[in-house]
Amino acid sequence: MAGSDRTLHLVSGDMAWCHAQAGNILDDLDQHRVLLLSNSLDGLATSHYRQILGKEFDCIIYDCFSGLDADALGSVCGTVRGGGALILLTPPLTDWSNFKDPDYRRHGYTDNEKPQGLFIQRLVHLLLNSDAATSHKQKENKQVNISLKPVTATAATDDQLHTIEAIERVALGHAKRPLVIKADRGRGKSAAIGIAAAKLLEKDKRNILVTAPSFAAVETLFRHAADNLPGFAMQQQALTHADGRRLSFIAPDKLVHDKPACDLLCVDEAAAIPAQLLEAMLKQQNRILFSTTVHGYEGSGRGFEIRFSKVLERLTPQWKTTSLKASIRWRDGDALEALLNDLLLFDADQTAFDTDMLDSSDLVISCVTQQELFKDEAALRAFFGLLVTAHYRTRPFDLRHLLDGKQLRLWRATINNRLVGALVCVEEGNIDEQLAQGIRSGKRRPKNQLVPQTLQQHLGVDQALETSYLRIMRIAVAPGLQRKGIGRRLLQTAATDYSQSTDLLATSFGATAELLDFWRTTGFTPVRIGLTRDASSGCHSVLMLAPLSGNGEMLMQNCQERYLETLPYLLRGGLSDLETNIIQRAFPHTSDALTKESRSRLELFSTHALSLDAVLPDLHQLTRLLLSGERHIDIKPEHLACLVSYSLQEIDSKDVATRLEIAGKSAAEKLLRDATTEGLQRLQ
């Protein structure tokens, strides 16, 4: 795309002066498409920034006095078109880090606490040393004049045309040949998918589905599709025609659960969706494309590529890939894009290196402080890049939290001075009585107190508030060096460092079989499963603990007892759809044994001598013992799933047959008797 670079302007001074300048700029640029983001002026509230994603503006004015939301900053920059400008209203730059930024509340601080302000200090340093930023200071008494030369893209790029053709081949050609589309922001990826979807619907494809972390993420896609689909109307997140053709949005978790049929599934921002959901989609759908932003707030495309390419090779070895490199909204080499990449480390995903040359016996684990990362840009980039590569939902907020988060504790693992592992933890608990009383009464919900509040509110364990915790927020190991004990070494070091001052290690995450296996092998025990699934991950959250002190051991036992008491009730209610492999790994241990009478009744049931209703309590006990033994009990997965569905989740025979994909009620009940026979054998 030809045209001028986008520009960045820093309007710095006291709030009243900056706000007055914003009014002048809006008056001067009234013939342009300008948006003001502010919580105190007449503009769009900064928390509502997602409403403008996919749109284009000649100028964005961001009121940093409303709080600098790193996610919002990274997002809205992508809406400024070539020749346009981003304007930041800020306190005097030399004093900005001392400003009581409202965003600090999200990082665990109260209004009376003074954060280090490292994120802003780094931001100011980079801005003052950038040729792409122009400074307008109050003390210089300058009238702020902004000149815009906006350029609008008028034609599709060759990259877009090639991508549209590739999408059409997925829908019209051979099945089971997925397409992966990769692009940086502003390359027209969503537009290409929307145009391709429209072309396919015009060719009489009936049903195209789109999934993404949120509908806001695909509004551009739907807008471009609508522009090319006369006669279609937008209703409830779907473009529909009177003859039944439709392009509709569906949330990732609902898609995997409902398994709807379609002519093409478009998975947009795939890097921000967990791999287990993507794998389920790949298995369910014959014609599917995945698109991902290589760098940016949407998720790390590099991390997606590392994690998911092996799945594609295993399930659909004839998958294809294409990339969009030419800019649509601004010219290639745009100065603002390069500056934002530095400011928010959009391009910090870890560079691949030859792990075969590294010997894990040379591993060194050490603490690192936020100040040390702040002072060493290369170390910060490597540390954050590893987090980006390892986790599907890393965003600019996490960069600010890494530098400014309250009570954070960091460790890193290196081999020959090369970063291979990172651990981010936060101190929680030790809540004073006044705050604890507010929590118990439901009047206070302090930040950075996830574990004690969860244990107190959902398990009813009051002493949890006065106990101390080190909660693991992120743990990451370089691809190619995973499953070599580096993660365990990081956890062991943290446990040793905190053994004299903390009662419990804790972790909370979206429950998958792989993650539960990892945490259980490192000594953690589940004590709570959340009742709702995360909309993007499709997983229930699980909270796990590992004791570091005698007090911690007592509290964990108390939590386990409450968990064991409440879990059977939850499995019949909010957790009635929880997968058996998760229940198996998250079920608490018990030392109970099957009574002689129960065994006798179950044996009679397995031979049709007793009916199901006569042995329901005995089946319940059998299933609990199969799930909670100290040693792993090897039983056929379909048998265990059948026992769990009937006895713990109390699902009727018809629904059990549907869930287990077997032929009807009689087949389900036969499977239950076979499962009972095997279960009794395993407990001998």
Image (cartoon, rainbow, N blue to C red):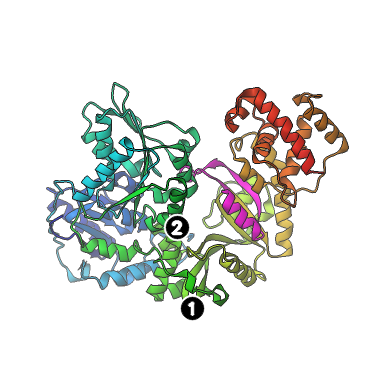
Disc 2, SS: helix
Count every numbered label the image shows and give the total. Answer: 2
- 606 left or right of 37 in image: right
**Residue found at the very far right of the displayed protein:** 596
State the quadrant of the N terminus.
bottom left
Foreground residue, 491 or 45? Answer: 491
Mark 2 or 1, which is nearer the eye? Answer: 1
Q: Which mark is residue 105?
A: 2
Q: Where does the image place residue 12, in percent across and percent down from the top left?
A: 25, 65
**Residue found at the very far top of the displayed protein:** 243
Q: Measuring 77% from the left and 23% from the top, which residue is drawn there?
A: 611
Foreground residue, 603 or 462? Answer: 603
Q: Quadrant of residue 384?
A: bottom left
Q: Where does the image place residue 320, in percent across and percent down from the top left?
A: 34, 48
- 64 left or right of 479 in image: left
Q: Is residue 435 visible?
A: no
Check disc 1 and report the residue beneath it. 416
Q: Measuring 59% from the left and 39% from the top, which residue is drawn there?
A: 578
Question: Amino acid under label 2?
Answer: Arg
Sequence-wise, the earlier of marks 2 and 1 is: 2
Q: Is residue 672 visible?
A: yes
Q: Measuring 14% from the left and 53% from the top, which residue is drawn there?
A: 150
State the quadrant of the C terminus.
top right
Q: Which residues are magenta?
A: 512-541
Instruction: Classify 682 as above or below 391.
Output: above
- 241 left or right of 300 in image: left
